[in-house]
Amino acid sequence: MAALERIFDYLEANDIRMYRFASGLAPYASHPELPQFHDQVSRCSEELARLGELARTRDLRLSSHPGQYTVLNSEDPVVRSSAVAEIEVQAAIMDAMGLGAEAVVVLHVGGLAGGVTTAGDRFLAGFEQLSDAGRARLVLENDDRSFGLADVLALSGRTGTRVVWDVLHHHCHDPAGIPEGEALRLASATWPATCTPKIHYSSPRLDVGERRVRQGRHVARQLVLPQLRAHADLVDPLGFERFIRDVGGGQDFDVMLEAKAKDLALLRLRAQLETRGLRSEAGRLHVSAHDRPPRRRGLVEAP
């Protein structure tokens, strides 16, 4: 808890108003074979409440994003039950902090076994195992291989969950061919008027890597070209500026920057955008009145 408070202090000092806290904030709290850790949230309720008050005072909006092993539509009932337990822990942390509805647990739909329809039905079965508190915090994100935005929106219509639109994932996987502006509008429409919608933005990695390959008694180096879906260390400022100016369409939304350099990527992007007339203040990005786009908020992802 002390470490999280220091993080809050850093965010305040750098005018960062959004933060994704690590999903391991309560280690082993959902582990089925370690029940001695299951009461961490209740044992730390006073500390969590104090941190929640600090977040509200500083207008700090929080979220979490459980890892790849949290698969709510898994074919394995044990994996599915573990996913339910993990989502419940994340939701309990946010509830203990007294956070508003903008604090969410972001999750991908999961595996594609059996096809989109069958896999979607499995997700609904897993979703129904969640408590009301868990359902209220859960939001869905489109992914870069299986569940495009149209698929996620369909599930949103069946469950009432909100949708976080990931721009890079959309560029990688969009079978329905939904234009950017329409994608932003459709995803934002799943959020109630009382909440600011969230999106994910990142730039694809472009640098060439190397790997060592053994060839007999020798080790050779081979060049490795990056995959389009891989996140870059930083955010392309020109691409981001184009997105903000051309796609925003007068909407107000929170932007999570998913970049390997974390806070350094955000601070660098801010500095670069300022040289192009895009100024940040109170955690929000402003564009010149002549262009009249909406203000945008910035977010740094947890290490």
Image (spheres, rainbow, N blue to C red):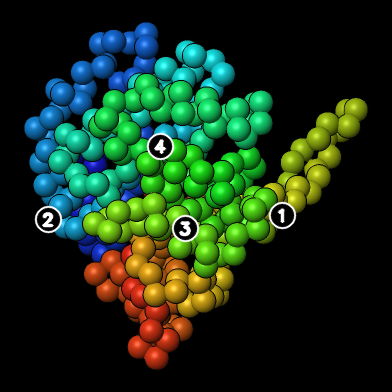
Which label's residue is closer to the chain start, 2 or 4?
Answer: 2
Seen in the picture, residue 241 relative to 226 is either above or below; the reply is: below
Which label's residue is closer to the chain start, 2 or 1?
Answer: 2
Q: Position of residue 194 (x, y in %)?
A: 24, 57
Residue 208 image label:
1
Q: Secondary structure at mark 3?
A: helix
For image coordinates 11% across by 38% down, the residue present is 49
Looking at the rendered image, the quarter that the C terminus falls into is: top left
Residue 159 image label:
4
For mark 3, what is the residue?
186
Q: Are the residues tagged 1 and 4 within 8 Å (C-beta)?
A: no
Q: Are the residues tagged 2 and 4 within 8 Å (C-beta)?
A: no
C-alpha span from label 3 to label 4: 16 Å
Residue lying at the far right of the rendered structure = 216
C-alpha span from label 2 to label 1: 44 Å
236 left or right of 172 in image: left
Q: Residues within 10 Å of mark 3 (few under 14, many from 20)?
A: some
The kind of residue tagged 4 is Thr
The kind of residue tagged 1 is Val
Residue lying at the far bottom of the rendered structure = 290
For image coordinates 19% across by 36% down, the residue present is 95
Asked if one can make out residue 262 in the rendered structure from this viewpoint, the answer is no
Q: Position of residue 257 (x, y in %)?
A: 44, 57
Q: Foreground: 219 or 240? A: 240
